[in-house]
Image: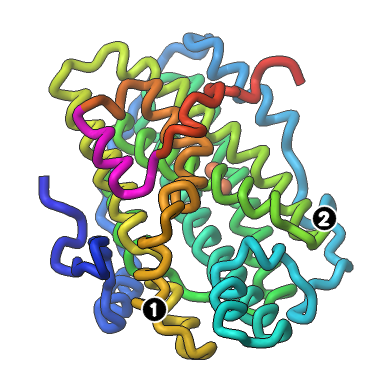
Amino acid sequence: MDKILSEHRRTIGDFEVIDVDESEIARLRAKLEIKAPCDINWTWEYGSEVAELRQLYEKGKTAQWNASTDLDWSIPVSKDDWVINPEGSLFANVLKMMGKDEATQKAAAFDELAFTVSQLLHGEQAALQLCGQLTNVCDKMDQKWYAASQVIDEARHVEVMARFLSEKMGTIYPIGGTLKVLLDMLLEAQGMNKKILGMQTLFEGMAVGIMEAMRQECRSPLFDRLLQLTGQDEARHAAFGVLQMRRVVADATPEEMADMEDWAFSILEALNANQQLDMLHVLGPKYGIEPDAVVQMMTSLPNFAELNSIAYMHTVVPNLRRLGLITERTEPRWRELGMMVDSRADRPQFELPIAGG
Ligand SMILES: [Fe+2]
Ligand SMILES: [Fe+2]
C-alpha cells in the first residue's frame, strides 16, 4: 500500500514528515466538489434489529442542546488572557524558550488555538456530510435513525465552532492540506464499513482525544462549555463507531481485517506525519518561529512519544486494538512513530455513553 501523500514527504532529522507546499494546498482547498457515489439502501424492517443502536439513538434525542441558548455568549474571550494554559500551547512553550515576553506568548497561543479550532470546524463539516451519506448507505433502520440524529449534532458543532471563531476569536483559518486530503478520502471511501471505520472510529476518536486534552487546559468558561457539550456528542459518535465495527470485525475475513488494519494505520500515520507543519507555516513567520526547527526539536525530545500520543491513546488506539485492528504486525509502527505508548494502553475502553444516565 502506497503511503498517503508520498510525493510530499521528506525527513526532518529522523522523522518522516508530510509537508504540502502552499500552491498544492491552495489547489486542494479549491477542490469543493467531491465525487462520492453512494449506495442507497431501502429496508422494509421498521422494527428495531440492533437494540444497542436504538438505545444510542434514544440517548442522542434526550442529549440534544441548543448552541444559541445553552452557551453564555456574553462571556468575553480575549487575546490578553490565557484561553488555554500556557503549558498546553506549543507556541507559548517555544516562545518562552526563545525568551519572548508573556504578551507575545499569549497572542501566539491565541492564534494557535484559533488555528486548531478552525481545523476541528472543517472536520465537523466533513462529519456532517459523511453522516448524511450514512443515512443512505446503512441498511438497517436503527443505523439510519442513529445517523440522522448525528447529522443534527454535527450541524450544531459546525454552528457552535464557526460562531466561537468568528465572534470570539476573530478568525477562521483555512483547512490544512493534509487534513483536506484525509477528509476527502473518508468522504470518497466506498461502502458503509469503511466510512464508519474512517469517520466514526478514527476521526471521532481523535476528536474526543483532542477536545478532552484542550478541556483539561482550558481557562475560558465559554470555551470549556463548548468543549463539554460538543465532547459529550462526540463520545456518542465514537460509541456508534465501536458498536458498528464490533459487528463488522466479527464477520470479517483475515484479508478484510488486514485491509482495515492497514487502512486505519495509513490514515492516522498521515495525520501524524504532518506534525503541525501546516500550522507552523501559517503562524510561525509571524512570531519568528522556524517550522523545521520546531519539528526537529519536538520529535527528538526524549518524551516525544508520551506527548505526541496523548490524543491517539485517549480513545482511538485502545479502540482499534480491542477491535483487532492493531495487531503484532502493525503495532511496532504505531510505537515507532510516537502514536502509541504503554502507559495508557490499558485504560478501560468502550465507555459507551448508553449505560445509565
Ligand atoms: Fe462533531
Ligand atoms: Fe462527531
Q: Amino acid at mark 2?
A: Leu
Asked whether residue 133 appears in the rendered view, the answer is no
- Type of amino acid under label 1: Pro
In which quadrant of the rendered image does the N terminus lie?
top left
Q: Which element type, helix, strand or loop, lies under badge 2?
A: loop
Looking at the image, residue 159 sits to the left or right of residue 192; the answer is right
Residue at x 83% of width, y 58% of height: 221
In the rendered view, how is the structure colored? Answer: rainbow
Look at mark 1 in the image and give the residue it sits on.
291
Q: Secondary structure at mark 1?
A: helix
Marks 1/2 in contact by CB < 8 Å: the verdict is no
State yes or no: Cβ of the residue under disc 2 lies below 8 Å from any atom of ligand 1: no
91 or 119, nearer to the observer = 91
Q: Which residues are magenta?
A: 329-340
Disc 2 designates what residue?
Answer: 71
Residue 300 placement (x, y as % from top left): 36, 62
- Residue 266 in the image: state x and y as whole percent: 24, 46
Residue at figure coordinates x 53%, y 47% from the top left: 207
Q: Position of residue 351 (x, y in %)?
A: 59, 23
Numbered label attached to residue 278: none
Q: Is residue 303 above or below residue 318?
A: below
Q: Position of residue 278 (x, y in %)?
A: 39, 72
Q: Which image quadrant is residue 97 in?
A: bottom right
Horizontally, is 7 left or right of 131 in the view?
A: left
| Residue in the picture at 32% in, 79% down | 26
- Neighbour class for label 1 at 10 Å: few (<14), some, many (≥20)? some
Compared with 294, 228 (above or below) is: above
The answer to whether residue 102 is seen in the rendering is: yes
Which residue: 53% across, 23% down? 349
Alpha-carbon span between mark 1 and mark 2: 36 Å
